[in-house]
Each structure stands twice: as structure tokens, then as C-alpha cells.
């Protein structure tokens, strides 16, 4: 699973429609302080349903919508799409939020539940709190992790976490 490109419109400082293409290998994003580098990572977490305002570096959920600047009025929605390449196929996952509160998740352009996105990506390591996004301080967290948490990371890497979740669902029914 490789992130090929992403498209942001109205998310945080990305007021205008912006496409970022990531070629194979390592991409480094450089720029001045406050230039929006971390906002790119926030956008990825957000698409995967991040609810934690602390993780998103926001006060409340509408704070991720472009708030306006001296030259550009505030936006009325935020939209982020991530395009992954997986086994030769392309997989698009997107989320939008409008200022009236309408929130939509999409897989390949079709509206889905957040749960469907999590299921589709289970076992790939891609998600908001897995190892595909390693935030500041997280290396330390992993090296100090309790066995339970360590196991969760191994299960995800081995691709078996999906079955654990299915088993849990079957048992509660
Ligand atoms: P650093 O090098 O300091 O880590 P950075 O490139 O990671 O900087 P970010 O933290 O991504 O920068 O961007 C912060 C900028 O995003 C701030 O200028 C902030 O005003 C802007 N910003 C955040 N949320 C919004 C929003 N909703 N609307 C407009 N601008 C926003
Ligand atoms: Mg930053």
C-alpha cells in the first residue's frame, strides 16, 4: 500500500484546491515554520476518522475548515482525498465536512461508513493510530509499550487484526 497522491481543498491552510503527488521512494516536505507541513499529516489522520482534537491540533471539529485570511474569505467545507496504490490497483479514500455539520466518508467515490474504511485498510498498517503515521514522541511510546499494545501493533503488521475485530463482533451478537 503506497500513498500516491492527495488532494486537499479547504482543509486548514489549504484554502485552494491542492494536489500533492508522491513519487516512489522517500518524499520530504520542507518549508518555513507555519507553512502547512504538519497540516498535510493532519489531513491524512483526519480522513481516517481522527476524532482527537489534540491529534488534529484543533479546538473543535470545524477548526479544520479554512478559517479565512486577509486575502481569502473563510471556507464552508473541507475536503481531503488520498489515493493509494495497492497490488496494481488504485484505491481512493476521502472525507468531507461542511460547516453545516454534514460529514461524508468515501471509498472510490462511493459514500461509506468510517467502519468500511477501517475494514478496507485493516492489516495494511494504514490508519490514524497505527504505525503508518509515526508522530512526534511515538517512537518512545512504542519502545515503552505495554505487552497488550505491542501485540496490537504486531497483529496489525501480520494482517490478523481484521479477524480479531470480526471475532469480537460475532461474540457480542
Ligand atoms: P513548523 O515548521 O513550525 O512545524 P508547519 O509547516 O508544520 O510548521 P503547520 O503546523 O502545518 O506548519 O501549519 C500551521 C499553519 O496552519 C498556521 O499558520 C495556522 O494559522 C494554519 N492553519 C491551521 N488551521 C487553519 C485553518 N482552519 N484555517 C486557516 N489556516 C489554518
Ligand atoms: Mg510542523
Image: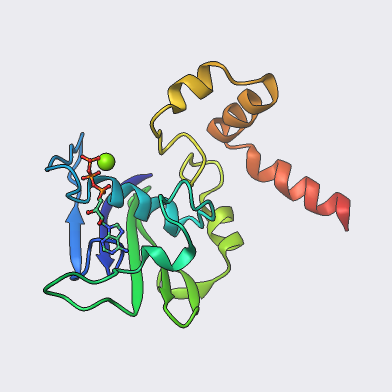
Of 97 and 85, the residue lying toward us: 97
Q: Outermost residue toward the bottom? A: 100
Residue 94 can be seen, yes or no = no
Q: Position of residue 1 (x, y in %)?
A: 38, 44
The image's colouring method is rainbow
Residue at image location 17% in from the left, 49% down from the top = 35
Q: Position of residue 27 (x, y in %)?
A: 19, 38
Q: Position of residue 104 (x, y in %)?
A: 48, 74
Residue at image location 43% in from the left, 27% down from the top = 137
Up-down relation of residue 125 to residue 47 (above or below): above
Q: Is residue 67 left or right of residue 45?
A: left
Of 87 and 31, the residue lying toward us: 31
Q: Outermost residue toward the front? A: 70
Q: Is residue 26 left or right of residue 150?
A: left
Q: How many numbered tags mark residues here?
A: 0
Residue at image location 59% in from the left, 54% down from the top = 119
Quadrant for residue 92, please give it.
Answer: bottom left
Of 56 and 125, the residue lying toward us: 56
Q: Outermost residue toward the top? A: 143
Quadrant of the image containing the C terminus: bottom right
Q: Position of residue 165 (x, y in %)?
A: 71, 46
Up-down relation of residue 54 to residue 25 (above or below): below
Q: Is residue 93 left or right of residue 29?
A: right
Residue at image location 20% in from the left, 34% down from the top = 26
Residue 122 can be seen, yes or no = yes
Amino acid at each position: 500500500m503506497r500513498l500516491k497522491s492527495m488532494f486537499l481543498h479547504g482543509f486548514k491552510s489549504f484554502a485552494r484546491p491542492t494536489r500533492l503527488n508522491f513519487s516512489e521512494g522517500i518524499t520530504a516536505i520542507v518549508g518555513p515554520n507555519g507553512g502547512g507541513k504538519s497540516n498535510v499529516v493532519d489531513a491524512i489522520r483526519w480522513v481516517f476518522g481522527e476524532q482527537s482534537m489534540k491529534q488534529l491540533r484543533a479546538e473543535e471539529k470545524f477548526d479544520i475548515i479554512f478559517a479565512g485570511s486577509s486575502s481569502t474569505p473563510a471556507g464552508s467545507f473541507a475536503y481531503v482525498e488520498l489515493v493509494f496504490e495497492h497490488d496494481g490497483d488504485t484505491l481512493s479514500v476521502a472525507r468531507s465536512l461542511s460547516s453545516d455539520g454534514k460529514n461524508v466518508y468515501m471509498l472510490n467515490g462511493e459514500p461509506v461508513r468510517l467502519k468500511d474504511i477501517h475494514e478496507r485498510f485493516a492489516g495494511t498498517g494504514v490508519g490514524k493510530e497505527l504505525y503508518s503515521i509515526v508522530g512526534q514522541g511515538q517512537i518512545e511510546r512504542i519502545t515503552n509499550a505495554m505487552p497488550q499494545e505491542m501485540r496490537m501493533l504486531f497483529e496489525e503488521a501480520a494482517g490478523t487484526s481484521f479477524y480479531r475485530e470480526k471475532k469480537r463482533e460475532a461474540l457480542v451478537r
